[in-house]
Image (cartoon, coloured by chain):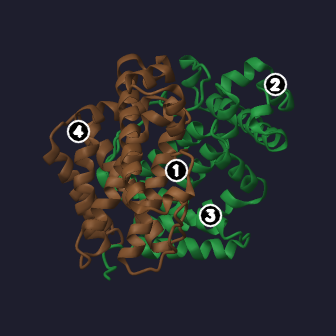
Chain colours: A brown, B green
Amino acid sequence: MSTVTVPRHHAEDTAPVTVGRRERKKQATRAALSRAAVRLSLEHGVENVTVEQIADAADVSLRTFFNYFSSKEEAVVAGDAARGEMLVDELTARPAAESPLTALQAAVHAFVDDLVSGERREALQMMRRSTALLPHQLAAYAATEQALAVAIAERVGEEVPDAGLDDDGAERPVGLYPALVAAVVMAGVRVAVQRWSDGGSRDLTALHEVVGEVFEHLGALRAREQ
Amino acid sequence: MSTVTVPRHHAEDTAPVTVGRRERKKQATRAALSRAAVRLSLEHGVENVTVEQIADAADVSLRTFFNYFSSKEEAVVAGDAARGEMLVDELTARPAAESPLTALQAAVHAFVDDLVSGERREALQMMRRSTALLPHQLAAYAATEQALAVAIAERVGEEVPDAGLDDDGAERPVGLYPALVAAVVMAGVRVAVQRWSDGGSRDLTALHEVVGEVFEHLGALRAREQ
Protein backbone atom coordinates (compact mmCIF):
# COMPACT_ATOMS: atom_id res chain seq x y z
CA MET A 1 0.00 0.00 0.00
CA SER A 2 1.79 3.11 -1.13
CA THR A 3 1.25 6.68 -0.11
CA VAL A 4 3.31 8.16 -2.95
CA THR A 5 1.05 9.75 -5.55
CA VAL A 6 3.71 11.35 -7.71
CA PRO A 7 2.86 10.93 -11.42
CA ARG A 8 5.20 8.55 -13.22
CA HIS A 9 7.00 9.27 -16.46
CA HIS A 10 7.93 6.03 -18.15
CA ALA A 11 10.38 7.49 -20.65
CA GLU A 12 12.51 8.97 -17.88
CA ASP A 13 12.25 5.84 -15.79
CA THR A 14 14.28 3.90 -18.34
CA ALA A 15 17.45 5.80 -17.37
CA PRO A 16 18.49 4.41 -13.95
CA VAL A 17 20.88 7.23 -13.04
CA THR A 18 18.25 9.90 -13.63
CA VAL A 19 15.74 7.89 -11.65
CA GLY A 20 18.20 7.62 -8.79
CA ARG A 21 18.74 11.38 -8.59
CA ARG A 22 15.08 12.20 -9.02
CA GLU A 23 14.17 9.57 -6.48
CA ARG A 24 16.60 10.98 -3.89
CA LYS A 25 15.24 14.50 -4.40
CA LYS A 26 11.71 13.25 -4.02
CA GLN A 27 12.62 11.37 -0.85
CA ALA A 28 14.21 14.52 0.62
CA THR A 29 11.12 16.62 -0.10
CA ARG A 30 8.92 13.90 1.28
CA ALA A 31 10.97 13.66 4.49
CA ALA A 32 10.99 17.45 4.92
CA LEU A 33 7.20 17.60 4.57
CA SER A 34 6.75 14.75 7.01
CA ARG A 35 9.10 16.29 9.60
CA ALA A 36 7.26 19.62 9.30
CA ALA A 37 3.90 17.86 9.70
CA VAL A 38 5.05 16.07 12.86
CA ARG A 39 6.69 19.16 14.37
CA LEU A 40 3.65 21.40 13.76
CA SER A 41 1.27 18.72 15.05
CA LEU A 42 3.32 18.31 18.21
CA GLU A 43 3.24 22.08 18.74
CA HIS A 44 -0.40 22.79 17.93
CA GLY A 45 -2.22 19.44 17.81
CA VAL A 46 -2.84 17.78 14.45
CA GLU A 47 -6.43 19.07 14.31
CA ASN A 48 -5.19 22.68 14.43
CA VAL A 49 -2.58 22.35 11.70
CA THR A 50 -3.36 23.11 8.05
CA VAL A 51 -1.79 21.66 4.93
CA GLU A 52 -0.77 25.23 3.99
CA GLN A 53 1.25 25.56 7.20
CA ILE A 54 3.02 22.27 6.54
CA ALA A 55 3.86 23.23 2.95
CA ASP A 56 5.11 26.65 4.10
CA ALA A 57 7.30 25.14 6.80
CA ALA A 58 8.90 22.80 4.25
CA ASP A 59 9.21 25.68 1.78
CA VAL A 60 7.17 24.05 -0.99
CA SER A 61 3.90 24.92 -2.71
CA LEU A 62 0.52 23.51 -1.73
CA ARG A 63 0.49 21.76 -5.08
CA THR A 64 3.78 20.06 -4.30
CA PHE A 65 2.45 18.92 -0.94
CA PHE A 66 -0.41 17.15 -2.68
CA ASN A 67 2.02 15.47 -5.06
CA TYR A 68 3.36 13.61 -2.03
CA PHE A 69 0.48 13.25 0.39
CA SER A 70 -3.27 13.36 0.08
CA SER A 71 -3.79 14.75 3.60
CA LYS A 72 -1.94 16.22 6.56
CA GLU A 73 -2.57 12.99 8.48
CA GLU A 74 -0.77 11.00 5.81
CA ALA A 75 2.21 13.36 6.08
CA VAL A 76 2.32 12.97 9.87
CA VAL A 77 2.50 9.16 9.73
CA ALA A 78 4.96 9.05 6.81
CA GLY A 79 7.72 8.47 9.36
CA ASP A 80 6.08 5.17 10.25
CA ALA A 81 6.35 4.03 6.65
CA ALA A 82 10.01 5.15 6.43
CA ARG A 83 10.81 3.36 9.69
CA GLY A 84 9.13 0.23 8.33
CA GLU A 85 11.40 0.38 5.30
CA MET A 86 14.36 0.65 7.66
CA LEU A 87 13.27 -2.50 9.47
CA VAL A 88 13.09 -4.38 6.17
CA ASP A 89 16.54 -3.07 5.17
CA GLU A 90 18.00 -4.18 8.51
CA LEU A 91 16.53 -7.64 8.02
CA THR A 92 17.84 -7.91 4.46
CA ALA A 93 21.31 -6.91 5.70
CA ARG A 94 21.49 -9.78 8.22
CA PRO A 95 23.69 -12.81 7.30
CA ALA A 96 21.82 -15.29 5.11
CA ALA A 97 22.81 -18.11 7.50
CA GLU A 98 20.67 -16.68 10.31
CA SER A 99 17.23 -18.18 10.85
CA PRO A 100 14.31 -15.80 10.30
CA LEU A 101 13.63 -15.30 14.01
CA THR A 102 17.30 -14.65 14.84
CA ALA A 103 17.71 -12.21 11.97
CA LEU A 104 14.40 -10.51 12.85
CA GLN A 105 15.41 -10.08 16.48
CA ALA A 106 18.61 -8.30 15.45
CA ALA A 107 16.74 -6.12 12.97
CA VAL A 108 14.07 -5.26 15.54
CA HIS A 109 16.67 -4.09 18.08
CA ALA A 110 17.87 -1.42 15.64
CA PHE A 111 14.30 -0.59 14.66
CA VAL A 112 12.99 0.04 18.17
CA ASP A 113 15.95 2.30 19.01
CA ASP A 114 14.87 4.55 16.19
CA LEU A 115 11.20 4.13 17.08
CA VAL A 116 11.49 5.45 20.62
CA SER A 117 14.21 8.05 20.21
CA GLY A 118 13.57 11.68 21.15
CA GLU A 119 10.97 13.47 19.09
CA ARG A 120 9.78 10.27 17.47
CA ARG A 121 8.73 9.02 20.87
CA GLU A 122 6.60 12.11 21.40
CA ALA A 123 5.23 11.74 17.89
CA LEU A 124 4.33 8.14 18.68
CA GLN A 125 2.39 9.16 21.76
CA MET A 126 0.58 11.90 19.83
CA MET A 127 -0.37 9.37 17.16
CA ARG A 128 -1.69 6.93 19.72
CA ARG A 129 -4.04 9.63 20.99
CA SER A 130 -5.32 10.87 17.63
CA THR A 131 -8.29 9.15 16.03
CA ALA A 132 -7.77 11.02 12.76
CA LEU A 133 -4.31 9.52 12.39
CA LEU A 134 -5.32 5.92 13.05
CA PRO A 135 -6.39 4.86 9.54
CA HIS A 136 -3.17 6.32 8.17
CA GLN A 137 -1.05 4.58 10.77
CA LEU A 138 -2.82 1.35 9.98
CA ALA A 139 -2.03 1.73 6.30
CA ALA A 140 1.66 2.33 7.10
CA TYR A 141 1.63 -0.66 9.46
CA ALA A 142 0.08 -2.88 6.77
CA ALA A 143 2.65 -1.76 4.21
CA THR A 144 5.51 -2.52 6.61
CA GLU A 145 4.09 -5.93 7.44
CA GLN A 146 3.73 -6.76 3.74
CA ALA A 147 7.30 -5.65 2.93
CA LEU A 148 8.58 -7.62 5.92
CA ALA A 149 6.72 -10.72 4.72
CA VAL A 150 8.41 -10.43 1.32
CA ALA A 151 11.84 -10.10 2.95
CA ILE A 152 11.18 -13.14 5.15
CA ALA A 153 9.95 -15.14 2.15
CA GLU A 154 13.16 -14.33 0.31
CA ARG A 155 15.21 -15.30 3.36
CA VAL A 156 13.60 -18.75 3.55
CA GLY A 157 14.18 -19.25 -0.16
CA GLU A 158 10.66 -18.64 -1.47
CA GLU A 159 10.31 -17.39 -5.03
CA VAL A 160 8.46 -14.09 -4.70
CA PRO A 161 7.11 -12.59 -7.94
CA ASP A 162 9.00 -9.39 -8.70
CA ALA A 163 7.23 -6.08 -8.32
CA GLY A 164 7.08 -4.23 -11.65
CA LEU A 165 8.85 -0.92 -12.19
CA ASP A 166 5.56 0.83 -11.66
CA ASP A 167 4.74 -1.14 -8.57
CA ASP A 168 5.19 0.98 -5.46
CA GLY A 169 5.28 -1.91 -3.01
CA ALA A 170 1.92 -3.32 -4.06
CA GLU A 171 1.05 -6.71 -2.65
CA ARG A 172 3.42 -9.46 -3.68
CA PRO A 173 1.99 -12.84 -2.76
CA VAL A 174 4.04 -14.81 -0.24
CA GLY A 175 3.46 -18.12 1.53
CA LEU A 176 1.59 -18.48 4.80
CA TYR A 177 4.74 -18.85 6.90
CA PRO A 178 6.39 -15.52 5.95
CA ALA A 179 3.06 -13.69 6.19
CA LEU A 180 2.48 -15.14 9.64
CA VAL A 181 5.99 -14.46 10.93
CA ALA A 182 5.78 -10.84 9.74
CA ALA A 183 2.44 -10.36 11.49
CA VAL A 184 3.65 -12.08 14.66
CA VAL A 185 6.88 -10.07 14.87
CA MET A 186 5.02 -6.79 14.29
CA ALA A 187 2.61 -7.78 17.08
CA GLY A 188 5.55 -8.66 19.30
CA VAL A 189 7.23 -5.29 18.67
CA ARG A 190 3.98 -3.51 19.47
CA VAL A 191 3.60 -5.41 22.76
CA ALA A 192 7.24 -4.83 23.71
CA VAL A 193 7.23 -1.09 22.98
CA GLN A 194 3.87 -0.55 24.67
CA ARG A 195 4.94 -2.45 27.79
CA TRP A 196 8.21 -0.55 28.02
CA SER A 197 6.45 2.74 27.33
CA ASP A 198 3.68 2.07 29.89
CA GLY A 199 6.37 1.35 32.46
CA GLY A 200 7.57 4.94 31.99
CA SER A 201 11.14 3.87 31.28
CA ARG A 202 13.34 5.79 28.90
CA ASP A 203 16.19 3.34 29.20
CA LEU A 204 17.02 1.67 25.89
CA THR A 205 18.69 -1.28 27.62
CA ALA A 206 15.38 -2.02 29.33
CA LEU A 207 13.60 -1.88 25.95
CA HIS A 208 16.08 -4.32 24.45
CA GLU A 209 15.53 -6.64 27.38
CA VAL A 210 11.77 -6.63 26.74
CA VAL A 211 12.38 -7.26 23.04
CA GLY A 212 14.70 -10.14 23.97
CA GLU A 213 12.06 -11.64 26.26
CA VAL A 214 9.45 -11.31 23.50
CA PHE A 215 11.60 -13.24 21.04
CA GLU A 216 12.41 -15.85 23.66
CA HIS A 217 8.69 -16.43 24.19
CA LEU A 218 8.03 -16.44 20.44
CA GLY A 219 10.61 -19.18 20.00
CA ALA A 220 8.96 -21.35 22.64
CA LEU A 221 5.21 -20.77 22.35
CA ARG A 222 4.41 -24.48 22.25
CA ALA A 223 6.75 -25.30 25.12
CA ARG A 224 4.73 -23.43 27.69
CA GLU A 225 2.59 -25.81 29.69
CA GLN A 226 0.90 -25.09 32.96
CA MET B 1 -11.78 -0.22 26.34
CA SER B 2 -15.53 -0.08 26.67
CA THR B 3 -18.07 1.37 24.33
CA VAL B 4 -20.97 1.22 26.79
CA THR B 5 -21.88 4.66 28.05
CA VAL B 6 -24.98 3.77 30.02
CA PRO B 7 -25.06 5.71 33.31
CA ARG B 8 -24.52 3.49 36.34
CA HIS B 9 -26.67 3.41 39.46
CA HIS B 10 -24.71 2.06 42.37
CA ALA B 11 -27.66 1.46 44.70
CA GLU B 12 -29.30 -0.86 42.16
CA ASP B 13 -26.05 -2.60 41.37
CA THR B 14 -25.98 -4.14 44.84
CA ALA B 15 -28.90 -6.45 43.94
CA PRO B 16 -27.40 -9.11 41.61
CA VAL B 17 -30.75 -10.43 40.24
CA THR B 18 -31.89 -6.96 39.18
CA VAL B 19 -28.51 -6.31 37.60
CA GLY B 20 -28.78 -9.59 35.67
CA ARG B 21 -32.18 -8.74 34.21
CA ARG B 22 -31.24 -5.15 33.46
CA GLU B 23 -28.00 -6.32 31.92
CA ARG B 24 -29.76 -8.81 29.63
CA LYS B 25 -32.23 -6.17 28.47
CA LYS B 26 -29.40 -3.75 27.78
CA GLN B 27 -27.52 -6.39 25.81
CA ALA B 28 -30.61 -7.14 23.70
CA THR B 29 -31.12 -3.46 22.86
CA ARG B 30 -27.45 -3.11 22.10
CA ALA B 31 -27.47 -6.12 19.78
CA ALA B 32 -30.63 -4.91 18.00
CA LEU B 33 -29.06 -1.49 17.37
CA SER B 34 -25.85 -3.06 16.12
CA ARG B 35 -27.69 -5.46 13.77
CA ALA B 36 -29.74 -2.55 12.38
CA ALA B 37 -26.58 -0.49 11.88
CA VAL B 38 -24.85 -3.31 9.97
CA ARG B 39 -27.91 -4.12 7.86
CA LEU B 40 -28.54 -0.48 6.90
CA SER B 41 -24.85 0.07 6.16
CA LEU B 42 -24.74 -2.99 3.92
CA GLU B 43 -27.81 -1.71 2.05
CA HIS B 44 -26.88 1.95 1.68
CA GLY B 45 -23.19 2.30 2.59
CA VAL B 46 -22.25 3.46 6.08
CA GLU B 47 -21.69 7.05 4.91
CA ASN B 48 -25.33 7.30 3.76
CA VAL B 49 -26.89 5.96 6.95
CA THR B 50 -28.00 8.26 9.76
CA VAL B 51 -28.21 7.53 13.46
CA GLU B 52 -31.95 8.33 13.25
CA GLN B 53 -32.48 5.55 10.70
CA ILE B 54 -30.64 3.06 12.91
CA ALA B 55 -32.66 4.05 15.99
CA ASP B 56 -35.91 3.83 13.98
CA ALA B 57 -35.02 0.41 12.61
CA ALA B 58 -34.36 -0.87 16.14
CA ASP B 59 -37.52 0.86 17.38
CA VAL B 60 -35.80 3.00 20.01
CA SER B 61 -35.39 6.76 20.46
CA LEU B 62 -32.38 8.73 19.32
CA ARG B 63 -31.62 9.37 22.96
CA THR B 64 -31.55 5.63 23.66
CA PHE B 65 -29.19 5.10 20.74
CA PHE B 66 -26.73 7.53 22.29
CA ASN B 67 -26.98 5.72 25.62
CA TYR B 68 -25.35 2.76 23.90
CA PHE B 69 -23.13 4.18 21.17
CA SER B 70 -21.54 7.53 20.54
CA SER B 71 -21.67 7.19 16.73
CA LYS B 72 -23.12 5.03 13.95
CA GLU B 73 -19.65 3.67 13.27
CA GLU B 74 -19.40 2.40 16.83
CA ALA B 75 -22.75 0.63 16.40
CA VAL B 76 -21.60 -1.02 13.17
CA VAL B 77 -18.47 -2.52 14.74
CA ALA B 78 -20.19 -3.57 17.98
CA GLY B 79 -20.41 -7.08 16.53
CA ASP B 80 -16.61 -7.23 16.57
CA ALA B 81 -16.60 -6.55 20.29
CA ALA B 82 -19.32 -9.15 20.92
CA ARG B 83 -17.44 -11.71 18.83
CA GLY B 84 -14.30 -10.94 20.82
CA GLU B 85 -16.18 -11.69 24.02
CA MET B 86 -17.27 -14.99 22.48
CA LEU B 87 -13.65 -15.90 21.78
CA VAL B 88 -12.72 -15.22 25.39
CA ASP B 89 -15.70 -17.29 26.62
CA GLU B 90 -14.67 -20.19 24.36
CA LEU B 91 -11.14 -20.04 25.74
CA THR B 92 -12.34 -19.93 29.34
CA ALA B 93 -14.55 -22.98 28.67
CA ARG B 94 -11.60 -25.14 27.50
CA PRO B 95 -10.26 -27.76 29.96
CA ALA B 96 -7.77 -26.30 32.42
CA ALA B 97 -5.28 -29.06 31.53
CA GLU B 98 -4.85 -27.76 27.98
CA SER B 99 -1.83 -25.59 27.26
CA PRO B 100 -2.60 -22.01 26.18
CA LEU B 101 -1.87 -22.64 22.50
CA THR B 102 -3.95 -25.83 22.36
CA ALA B 103 -6.89 -24.19 24.14
CA LEU B 104 -6.58 -21.09 21.95
CA GLN B 105 -6.58 -23.11 18.77
CA ALA B 106 -9.84 -24.82 19.76
CA ALA B 107 -11.39 -21.48 20.76
CA VAL B 108 -10.27 -19.86 17.51
CA HIS B 109 -11.92 -22.57 15.40
CA ALA B 110 -15.32 -21.71 16.87
CA PHE B 111 -14.57 -17.99 16.63
CA VAL B 112 -13.68 -17.96 12.93
CA ASP B 113 -16.79 -19.93 12.02
CA ASP B 114 -18.85 -17.13 13.47
CA LEU B 115 -16.57 -14.49 11.99
CA VAL B 116 -17.02 -15.57 8.37
CA SER B 117 -20.61 -16.78 8.43
CA GLY B 118 -23.19 -15.25 6.08
CA GLU B 119 -23.99 -11.61 6.71
CA ARG B 120 -21.07 -11.19 9.06
CA ARG B 121 -18.73 -12.01 6.20
CA GLU B 122 -20.26 -9.26 4.10
CA ALA B 123 -20.08 -6.92 7.08
CA LEU B 124 -16.41 -7.75 7.49
CA GLN B 125 -15.68 -6.88 3.87
CA MET B 126 -17.61 -3.62 4.20
CA MET B 127 -15.60 -2.76 7.31
CA ARG B 128 -12.32 -3.47 5.58
CA ARG B 129 -13.25 -0.95 2.89
CA SER B 130 -14.46 1.84 5.18
CA THR B 131 -11.95 4.33 6.56
CA ALA B 132 -14.54 5.79 8.92
CA LEU B 133 -14.97 2.43 10.63
CA LEU B 134 -11.27 1.70 11.11
CA PRO B 135 -10.67 3.52 14.39
CA HIS B 136 -13.73 1.83 15.85
CA GLN B 137 -12.65 -1.58 14.65
CA LEU B 138 -9.24 -0.98 16.13
CA ALA B 139 -10.78 -0.14 19.49
CA ALA B 140 -12.84 -3.35 19.40
CA TYR B 141 -9.74 -5.31 18.38
CA ALA B 142 -7.72 -3.82 21.26
CA ALA B 143 -10.50 -4.62 23.74
CA THR B 144 -10.64 -8.24 22.54
CA GLU B 145 -6.87 -8.60 22.74
CA GLN B 146 -6.86 -7.23 26.27
CA ALA B 147 -9.67 -9.54 27.43
CA LEU B 148 -7.90 -12.48 25.78
CA ALA B 149 -4.66 -11.60 27.57
CA VAL B 150 -6.49 -11.66 30.91
CA ALA B 151 -8.01 -15.07 30.11
CA ILE B 152 -4.59 -16.45 29.11
CA ALA B 153 -3.01 -15.02 32.26
CA GLU B 154 -5.64 -16.78 34.37
CA ARG B 155 -5.06 -20.02 32.45
CA VAL B 156 -1.32 -20.00 33.19
CA GLY B 157 -2.01 -19.28 36.85
CA GLU B 158 -1.19 -15.59 36.98
CA GLU B 159 -2.88 -13.50 39.63
CA VAL B 160 -4.75 -10.83 37.70
CA PRO B 161 -6.15 -7.92 39.75
CA ASP B 162 -9.95 -8.09 39.68
CA ALA B 163 -11.87 -5.50 37.71
CA GLY B 164 -14.18 -3.52 39.97
CA LEU B 165 -17.97 -3.65 39.62
CA ASP B 166 -17.81 -0.39 37.75
CA ASP B 167 -15.03 -1.55 35.51
CA ASP B 168 -16.32 -2.36 32.03
CA GLY B 169 -13.28 -4.36 30.93
CA ALA B 170 -10.81 -1.59 31.58
CA GLU B 171 -7.16 -2.56 31.42
CA ARG B 172 -6.12 -5.20 33.89
CA PRO B 173 -2.36 -5.57 34.00
CA VAL B 174 -1.06 -8.99 32.92
CA GLY B 175 2.44 -10.40 32.44
CA LEU B 176 4.38 -10.14 29.20
CA TYR B 177 3.70 -13.74 28.17
CA PRO B 178 -0.13 -13.57 28.18
CA ALA B 179 -0.08 -10.14 26.51
CA LEU B 180 2.23 -11.46 23.80
CA VAL B 181 0.30 -14.68 23.19
CA ALA B 182 -2.96 -12.72 22.89
CA ALA B 183 -1.39 -10.34 20.36
CA VAL B 184 0.23 -13.18 18.42
CA VAL B 185 -2.94 -15.26 18.24
CA MET B 186 -5.01 -12.25 17.12
CA ALA B 187 -2.39 -11.60 14.42
CA GLY B 188 -2.51 -15.27 13.42
CA VAL B 189 -6.31 -15.20 13.14
CA ARG B 190 -6.11 -12.09 10.99
CA VAL B 191 -3.56 -13.67 8.65
CA ALA B 192 -5.55 -16.93 8.43
CA VAL B 193 -8.89 -15.26 7.68
CA GLN B 194 -7.39 -12.81 5.20
CA ARG B 195 -5.54 -15.59 3.33
CA TRP B 196 -8.65 -17.75 3.18
CA SER B 197 -10.80 -14.78 2.19
CA ASP B 198 -8.32 -13.61 -0.50
CA GLY B 199 -8.40 -17.13 -1.93
CA GLY B 200 -12.11 -16.63 -2.57
CA SER B 201 -13.04 -19.81 -0.70
CA ARG B 202 -16.28 -20.10 1.24
CA ASP B 203 -15.46 -23.55 2.53
CA LEU B 204 -15.19 -23.64 6.31
CA THR B 205 -13.07 -26.80 6.23
CA ALA B 206 -10.47 -24.89 4.21
CA LEU B 207 -10.54 -22.07 6.77
CA HIS B 208 -9.98 -24.52 9.61
CA GLU B 209 -7.06 -26.00 7.71
CA VAL B 210 -5.45 -22.57 7.41
CA VAL B 211 -6.04 -21.95 11.13
CA GLY B 212 -4.47 -25.34 11.87
CA GLU B 213 -1.42 -24.47 9.77
CA VAL B 214 -1.12 -21.12 11.52
CA PHE B 215 -1.06 -22.75 14.95
CA GLU B 216 1.39 -25.38 13.75
CA HIS B 217 3.75 -22.61 12.62
CA LEU B 218 3.21 -20.67 15.85
CA GLY B 219 4.23 -23.72 17.85
CA ALA B 220 7.46 -24.10 15.90
CA LEU B 221 8.67 -20.59 15.09
CA ARG B 222 12.18 -21.25 16.37
CA ALA B 223 12.45 -24.62 14.63
CA ARG B 224 12.37 -23.14 11.16
CA GLU B 225 15.86 -22.94 9.75
CA GLN B 226 16.80 -22.44 6.15
In the displayed structure, B178 sits above or below A177; it is: above
The residue carrying pointer 3 sits among few (fewer than 14), some (14 to 19) or many (20 or more) residues within 10 Å by Cα, namely some
Numbered badge on residue A2: 1
Three-letter residue code for mark 2: Val
Identify the residue position indicated by label 3 in the image. B110
Distance CA(mark 4)–CA(mark 2): 50 Å
In the displayed structure, B2 sits above or below B124; it is: above
Which sits in the foreground, A25 or A5? Answer: A25
Residue occupying image coordinates x 35% and y 35%: A124
In the image: residue A119, left or right of residue B125: left
Three-letter residue code for mark 1: Ser
Identify the residue position indicated by label 2 in the image. B60
Could you tell me which secondary element the residue under label 1 belongs to? loop
The residue carrying pointer 1 sits among few (fewer than 14), some (14 to 19) or many (20 or more) residues within 10 Å by Cα, namely few
Q: Do the residues labelled 4 and 2 touch (CB within 8 Å)?
A: no
Which sits in the foreground, A75 or A111? Answer: A75
